[in-house]
Amino acid sequence: MSSKKRIVVGLSGGVDSSVTAWLLKQQGHEVIGVFMQNWEDDNDDEYCSIKEDAADAIAVADIVGIDIEIVNFAKEYKDRVFKYFLDEYSAGRTPNPDVLCNAEIKFKAFLDYAVDLGAEVIATGHYARKIERDGKHYLAKAVDDTKDQSYFLYRLSQSQLSKAIFPLGDIRKTEVRKLAEEACLPNFAKKDSTGICFIGERPFREFLNRYLPRTPGPMVTPEGRVMGQHEGLMYHTIGQRKGLGIGGQGEPWFVADKDIPHNKLIVVQGHDHPLLLKPELSAQQLSWTLDQPSALGRYSAKTRYRQQDAACTVVAVDAETCTVHFDEPQWAVTPGQSVVLYDGDICLGGGVIQ
């Protein structure tokens, strides 16, 4: 980016967005910080870090030398992200709210707000790259493949990508922390946030219990042998090993499926049980960063974040559904999570696994 621009940066209080703001300021751009408050149900909860994060963001803005605004997007978040989150868990699926948060909050509600502030583009601390070629905006993997976050950005449209930049896409995380320390940013050693944004470090079951009723039922083998009781299908995900409470000798037990009509959790013994391996999947709620891929294309795909790319073929695709066949069966493919397609380093888009 050669010409100087008015850029609004999403400042989260973390080291990545802080270095993003610092880099852009060093390059001579007019930078404004915005701290997004997306959750307010339990701001005084012991697990809530919003106040600490906001204080860190304000301290960083002061050192970098930029103005910062704290903007409340909690209503938009509840309507566009949290409602979907609860609906999916109620239906027995395992959603990925971070994907929706990016598409609906950071690159929609926040983007609209930034444009009203006169921003030419917005910047975030995501590890991803944007490549402009022949008038199109390509979403690409970050140079640091251990931190690449293109998986979470697959729902961004051409119009959203045209207004976004990712200054950390060409930098490794170790270098980001080093830059933060050299710039005397107070959060240079701050631990990366983990888990779902609004749940944070709090116990997951305890959180869900506030919003959804518990529905206990049997844990059974595929043959129907009862192995124990579950507290609710919503607490479990495909491939889960911990917390099942099934003792005995032999290989460990895993969640392989959910019989939702009968409220049964299907469990199997052994990591490589055939029910845990899927050669094919179908996805809906499709979203493409570029043109929709044609059927019979050869690509690679991730069915979860931090997974190695898996060679695959798109065997059918239309406006509603995409069917993907993998060269090697994939472990613990989970309904509600996203399958994201890549052509080399370019993220094409994807959909929600059915």
Image (cartoon, rainbow, N blue to C red):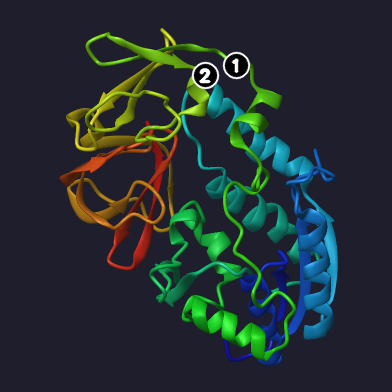
**Left or right: 239, with 64 as reference point:** left
Check if mark 2's residue and mark 1's residue have beta carbons within 8 Å: yes
Please name the residue shown 75% across and 80% down the image.
31
Q: Residues within 10 Å of mark 1 (few under 14, many from 20)?
A: some
What is the three-letter code of the residue carrying label 1? Arg
Please name the residue shown 52% across and 56% down the image.
156
User: To which residue does mark 2 refer?
Assistant: 232
Q: Residue 262 at x, y = what percent?
A: 41, 7
Q: Is residue 29 above or below residue 223?
A: below
**Left or right: 317, with 273 as reference point:** right
Find numbered disc 2 in the image and state the secondary structure of the residue it sits on.
loop
Q: Quadrant of the C terminus?
A: top left
Quadrant of the rendered image containing residue 228: top left
Please name the residue shown 66% across and 42% down the image.
202
User: To which residue does mark 1 refer?
Assistant: 214
**Left or right: 205, with 211 as reference point:** left
Q: Is residue 23 visible?
A: no
C-alpha separation, residue under disc 2 versus residue under disc 1:
6 Å
Q: Residue 250 at x, y = what percent?
A: 22, 29
Please name the residue shown 80% across and 40% down the image.
42
Q: Is residue 4 visible?
A: yes
Q: Is residue 275 above or below residue 121?
A: above
Quadrant of the rendered image containing residue 330: top left
What is the three-letter code of the residue carrying label 2? Gly
